[in-house]
Amino acid sequence: MKKFGENNRINVIGDTLKKARKNKGYNKTELCHKLELLGINFERNEIYRIENYKKSVKDFELIAFCIVLDIDFNELKKLLEY
């Protein structure tokens, strides 16, 4: 699996996802239910793995996270600029 950046992480959204989820007051299970309404099926442990940089995130999943958690997609682009 390819890794990104100096930290050799599998995704770039881990910390942002965790902070946004907590700011919304969602636990991992609640986030899974919100994503399910958009047709994205996640298990609780998959959210954990993303937040801890152990699972990659597909583009459509990233967009769903942005929608559910009110994350500005343009802010995510800044994570790629290092």
Image: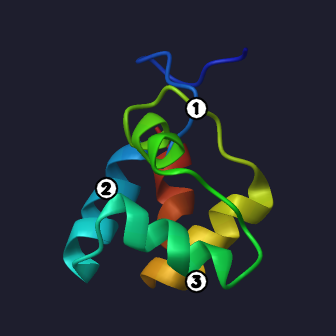
Left or right of 13 on screen, residue 18: left
Q: Is residue 31 above or below residue 42?
A: below
- Residue 8 location, x and y as percent? 50, 16
Mark identifier at residue 81: none
**Kind of residue sitting beneath label 3:** Ile
**Residue at the disc numbered 1:** 55
Residue at left offset 26%, top offset 61%: 19
**Residue at the disc numbered 3:** 67
- Residue 2 location, x and y as percent? 71, 17
**For mark 3, does the 10 Å Cα neighbourhood hold few (<14), some (14 to 19), or many (20 or more) residues?**
some
Identify the image quadrant of residue 10.
Answer: top right
- Residue 49 location, x and y as percent? 46, 34
The answer to which of marks 1 and 2 sits earlier in the sequence is 2
Instruction: Answer yes or no: is residue 18 visible.
Output: yes
- Residue 56 location, x and y as percent? 64, 35
**For mark 2, does the 10 Å Cα neighbourhood hold few (<14), some (14 to 19), or many (20 or more) residues?**
some
Q: Is residue 74 above or below residue 68?
A: above
**Residue at the disc numbered 2:** 18
**Kind of residue sitting beneath label 1:** Lys
Identify the image quadrant of residue 35.
Answer: bottom right
Real-space Cα separation, disc 1 to disc 2, in angstroms = 14 Å
Quarter that holds the N terminus: top right
Residue at left offset 65%, top offset 73%: 64
